[in-house]
Image (cartoon, rainbow, N blue to C red):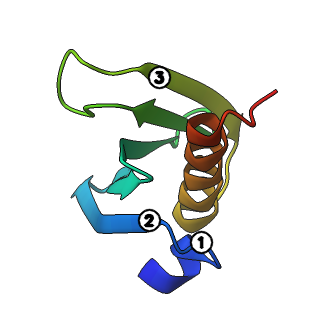
Amino acid sequence: MRDSLLGESASIEGFQWSAPRPDTRLVTALYRDHPVCVKVLQDVVSDGTHTFVTLGDPGGMAAERTIEYITDYTSFEDAMTMGLEVARAAADGREA
C-alpha cells in the first residue's frame, strides 16, 4: 500500500500509515521538511469521505494550515493518495 500511495514522488520521508478505527485511515510523513498528516474519515451514513490534510505539526498547535475536503464515497487508498497530492501542492505553493 505504501508504494501505491507514494507513487513517483521521491521527497516523502518518515511515512507512517495507521487505521485507528475501522472508518478512519491516517498517514503521517515529512515532505520537503514539512510535517504532513492526511486523515481520511468515511461516513457510512451519508456515503461520503472526509479528507483532512494538515501541514505543520499534525498533533499540535503549530499547524501551518489544514485543508478539508468532502467527496462522495471513495476508497481509503484513493482518498489518501489525493490527500498526499494536496499536501505536496500546498507545501510547494502550487495550490489554486
In the rendered image, is residue 48 in sight?
no
User: Which residue shows up at 61% across the image and 32% down it?
Assistant: 46
**Depth check, front residue: 45 or 21:** 21
User: Which residue shows up at 27% across the image and 60% down it?
Assistant: 19
Q: Quadrant of the N terminus?
A: bottom left
Answer few, some or many: residues within 10 Å of disc 2's Cα (few below 14, many 20 plus, some between 14 and 19).
some
Tell me the mark number nearer the camera, choosing from 2 and 3: 2
Q: Quadrant of residue 30?
A: bottom left
- Secondary structure, mark 2, is strand
Where is mark 1, residue-wise?
Answer: 9
**Depth check, front residue: 54 or 52:** 54
Where is mark 2, residue-wise?
Answer: 12
Q: Residue 41: image x %, image y %?
A: 44, 42
Tell me the mark number nearer the camera, choosing from 1 and 3: 1
Q: Quadrant of the C terminus?
A: top right
Q: Residue 84: image x %, image y %?
A: 55, 53
User: Which residue shows up at 43% across the image and 45% down it?
Assistant: 38
How far apart, in angstroms, are the residues tagged by discs 2 and 3? 19 Å
Where is mark 3, residue-wise?
Answer: 66
Q: Earlier in the sequence, mark 2 or mark 3?
A: 2
